[in-house]
Amino acid sequence: MKRLTHEVQKKTVGLIVDRIMSEKNPEDRRKSLKHLSFVMEHLFGDLFEKESFEEARRLIDEDGKWFHFLDHALNTLNPNIVKTAVMDLGFESGFYGLRARNAAKAKYHCNIPWAILFDPTSACNMHCIGCWAAEYGHTLNLSFDVMDKIVTQGKELGCHFYLLTGGEPLVRKADIIRLCRKHPDCEFHAFTNGTLIDDAFCHEVTDVGNLSFSLSVEGYREVNDSRRGAGHFDKVMHAMDLLREHGIVFGTSICYTRKNIETVTSDDFLDLLIRKGAYFTWYFHYMPVGNDASPDLMPTKEQRAYMVRRVREIRSVKGGKPIFAIDFQNDGQYIDGCVAGGRNYCHINPNGDVEPCVFIHYSSANIKNQSLLECLQQPLFKEYAKGQPFNHNHLRPCPMLENPQYLAAMVKRSGAKSTDLISPESAEHLCAKCKEYAKQWQPVADTLWKEIQEKGKHDIEQKKDPLPKCG
């Protein structure tokens, strides 16, 4: 009966999505979008505040930035890509899967993730300076059967969203397409250097429909290629052109450091990404992970304060840019702090070690010889669950970067070991590199957090004060 209900609801939503996609008149599309919001509220209203649905309808009614953003996407993207993303990432993961994850969390007394990152391989066709993924070496792979196990067991717990990292995941693109075909009710998203994307592969992607991309780029040609190698900038620009021409959803993955922060958030750079067809941009704070990491690349406190304001300005409802910006380190206010340790996501490295975060390389569980549920119940993940949020100031969310006293203690109590196969780093050594940064950031973060609380998250999105200059 439960399965039948799921199929009937999915069919109902799918028919409305078909209608939305077929509408060419913006007003007719607006009406169909609002109809979908009422249907979703009827089916899943117990999972969300009523205000969430009302806010969605308000944005639809406004002839504003985000409605035009959505309307443009519906008119531009490949229809199979659009519908599959809506059904897999929206219906299966965001709504139906949420109910399943909540039930599993209550039943098994552990965190159940919304998304799982896993590395198909540690191999890469590039040798970027300072790449944390290189700590796993270049010869490890998750077999297709292990990747299939992750997804199959993840779906049983309500997880329908899988992010592929590496290494370079597209070294295994044949297996990735095979995985997409076997699990059409899941959305897959690859973080890639873009150099292995070609026309033939794009045809396969539009055929399966459930694969999207974040392309790594760290500025214009000179700065980007100084770290990623000569010619990479031109190759990633070409990959963007191919993805845009085929109507495939993509965005960028940008690691911001003390050296590139102004460039990668500038109007000119964002305008370039928008012209190329990017719909979103992930910003990741540089993390000093690994024995050979360079703490001096971490942004200054002034630069990070700039990022807090700048990203909110970019995605502001009024003004900003028609691209959705996400800051992994500074958007904790929207997700109640740290999301690692399975609370919203976890990471599985190419050796099969199940880690709390892509930046936290410690574990005592391996997917190759344990079930996914057993891995999520490992002691380190339970330490995360007990400690979250690690700070009630969500501009200081991480147990490593902003609260380094917590990670070392959790690793010690849990008995987790370093998963770095090349040069194992102790949690104490890692956290020691963050202590001065955390000390410097705390008073600035506390001031910003007070401002956010006083003005409300909607007001901070509309902030018109001049942005502080980078330090």
Image (spheres, rainbow, N blue to C red):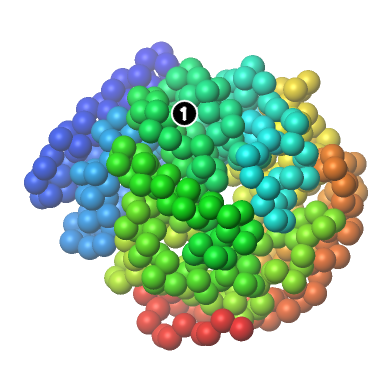
- 105 versus 314 height, above or below: above
Q: Residues within 10 Å of mark 1 (few under 14, many from 20)?
A: many
Q: Nearer the viewer, residue 129 or 422?
A: 129
Work out whether 461 lies above or below 179. Answer: below
Left or right of 184 on screen, residue 120: right
Residue 446 visible in the shown view:
no
Residue 418: x, y in percent?
85, 43
Q: What element carries label 1?
A: loop
- Position above or below: 248 against 7: below
Above or below, 293 against 164 in this view is below
Image coords of residue 165 (percent x, y) = 61, 40
Quadrant where the N terminus is found in the figure: top left
**Is residue 177 shown to the viewer in this render?**
yes
Q: Where is residue 187 in the image (x, y as percent from the top left)?
A: 46, 33
Q: Which residue lies furthest to the front in this view?
A: 230
- Residue occupying the point 47% across, 82% down: 467
Q: Specify the amino acid type for callout 1.
A: Cys
Residue visible at 39% across and 72% down in the picture: 267
Q: Would you say 202 lies left or right of 261 here?
A: left
- Residue at image coords 75%, 31%: 139
Identify the residue under disc 1. 186
